[in-house]
Image: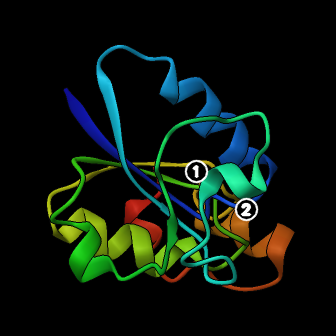
């Protein structure tokens, strides 16, 4: 069973990802984070999801690395760079669905976002 955490799970992307992963027979969702909704049952926010018992929690990476093997990031622009770097150093697998690692070139990233990418060696 693959233990999965969804970081930034309160938006549309996080909701759809959660819905899909809940039906996967080999995945166990161990955490869903939201800074604004921490402590709230996921089912109170997403009415299309039922009976999970999951609550949104704060994104405390030191605690979360102990709870999951794979991390999906659905975070706002410029938020996932440090998170990906921390998880990478911790030996965790990461799938970033946000914008920070969408582009493969630091130069192209700077052109589109008018800011340098702080972890360009992790761009692939």
SS class, disc 1: loop
Give residue 70's quadrant in the image: top left
Any part of residue 103 in sight? no
Q: Residue at x 43, y 17 (%)?
A: 24
Q: Quadrant of the N terminus?
A: top left
Q: Is residue 71 placed above or below 61 in the rendered structure?
A: above
Q: Residues within 10 Å of mark 1 (few under 14, many from 20)?
A: some
> Horizontal and vertical percent for residue 14?
66, 49
Question: Going by the image, does 57 lie left or right of 9?
Answer: left
Q: Are marks 1 and 2 in contact (CB under 8 Å)?
A: yes
| Residue at image coords 70%, 59% | 99
**Camera-side residue of 79 and 117:** 79
Extreme residue toward the top, this view: 25
| Residue 121, x across and y down, in percent | 38, 66
Provide the residue designation for mark 2.
108
Q: Write down the residue under mark 1.
A: 104
Q: Secondary structure at mark 2?
A: helix
Can you see residue 28?
yes
Q: Callout 2: 10 Å neighbours few (<14), some, many (20+)? A: few
Q: Is residue 104 left or right of residue 98?
A: left
In this rendering, the answer to whether 109 lies above or below 53 is below
* Residue 62, x across and y down, in percent: 23, 81
Q: Quadrant of residue 16?
A: top right
Tell which of 68 and 105 is nearer to you. 68
User: Could you tell me which residue is drawn at 54 percent across and 71 percent down?
Assistant: 80
Residue 41 image position (x, y, % from top left): 59, 61
């Amino acid at each position: 069973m693959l233990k999965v955490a969804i970081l930034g799970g309160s938006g549309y992307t996080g909701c759809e990802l959660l819905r899909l992963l809940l039906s996967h027979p080999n995945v166990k969702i161990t955490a869903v984070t939201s800074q604004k909704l921490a402590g709230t049952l996921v089912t109170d926010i997403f009415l299309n999801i039922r009976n999970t018992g999951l609550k949104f929690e704060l994104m405390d990476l030191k605690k979360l690395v102990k709870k999951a093997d794979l991390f999906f990031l659905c975070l706002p622009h410029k938020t996932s760079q440090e998170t990906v770097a921390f998880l990478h150093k911790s030996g965790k697998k990461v799938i970033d669905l946000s914008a920070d690692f969408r582009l493969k070139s630091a130069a192209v990233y700077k052109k589109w976002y008018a800011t340098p990418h702080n972890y360009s060696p992790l761009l692939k």
